[in-house]
Amino acid sequence: MTLAARSLLLLTVCAAAIATRPVHAQPPMPLPKDLPKSPKVPTTYEGLFAEREARAVAVVGYLQCMQRTITALRTGVLGNVPRAWSITCVQQGNEWRGVFGELTDDFTGFAVRLQFALRGPGVLVKDPVDTAAVNGTARALLRGLAAPAPGRGTAEYIPVPLAQKGFTEVWFVPVPSNPTQMTVGGDSLIQMTADGKRELGHSLAIPPIRQLTVPTSGASYTLPSLEERLPLLSELVVARMALDVFPEVRIRTRQYDAVLTRANGTWTSTQR
């Protein structure tokens, strides 16, 4: 499994890249006058599952984007990239892009210097990009790297900034220990303003952190969840990544069995 190696590479390089960028202390700022409206929370199992699965798909996309962008950086595909530039990944339309640039004090908040689009093997582009999303996720990533990680050292976690409608989320995602040991639990979230400058809230409780032993081959893999109904975000992320190895992946909560197959790429849930 390449999952562990990719994630550990991502964690090390991402943290190093941000650490080299000068960070200047900012004076205290008042809370924004127009707070984002609270998102409408689904009331059904299907709706809640779809919301969490959408986050899991975005997390996997972000991690893959960062891994491929960093690989391109290390192999010289991107040319000479100043160490002081910030890096983030955003979804532009149907594709992910690794974006390098500099945080600014003007209305855009971010000066885009270079874009690496995940088209085929990856290509440098100068196409328009959502600068507001780039600015928000780049700043939110800085907040995530500065925040205490879940688990207090019992497991490695990486912050993943995701732009949402009207705000930005920073999810802390566990990094696999090795190719056959996956970590789930410890899911933690920071909600930021859309520009990534102010924190709006932070999850107060986190689910237990567990280590799962994952086979390296087989026709199917079942991930046992301790949750009553909905799988954790971290469990859905591991399941999505495990689909590279197993044609079928199942998450079993106390009330539901959710099955994902490589053939159709969508979940099917049945009540137990």
Image: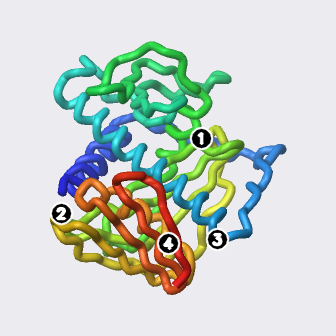
> Amino acid under label 3?
Tyr
Residue 80 seen in the figure: yes
Choose mark 3 or mark 4, whichever is in front: 3
Name which residue lies at 16% across and 65% down.
Answer: 217
* Residue pointed to by mark 1: 26
Give how far across and how far down residue 221 sits, in percent. 29, 71
Crowding around mark 2 (Cα neighbors within 10 Å: few <14, some 14 to 19, many 20+) is some
Disc 3 from disc 1: Cα separation: 42 Å
Q: Which mark is residue 231?
A: 4
Disc 2 from disc 4: Cα separation: 22 Å
Q: Quadrant of residue 79?
A: top left
Disc 2 from disc 3: Cα separation: 32 Å
Name which residue lies at 31% across and 57% down.
Answer: 243
Disc 3 from disc 4: Cα separation: 11 Å
* Residue pointed to by mark 3: 45
Q: Secondary structure at mark 2?
A: loop
Q: Going from the N terminus, do you reach mark 1 or mark 2 first?
A: 1
* Residue pointed to by mark 2: 179
Q: Secondary structure at mark 4?
A: loop
Is residue 116 placed above or below 156 in the rendered structure? above
> Amino acid under label 1?
Gln
Give whichever of 139, 24 is nearer the camera.
139
> Amino acid under label 2?
Pro
Find the residue positioned furthest to the right: 33
Give how far across and how far down residue 47 sits, in percent. 66, 62
Disc 1 from disc 4: Cα separation: 39 Å
Do the numbered discs 1 and 4 sit on residues whose CB atoms are within 8 Å? no
Q: Going from the N terminus, do you reach mark 2 or mark 3 first?
A: 3
Give how far across and how far down residue 146 sits, in percent. 46, 54
Give whichever of 40, 137 is nearer the camera.
40
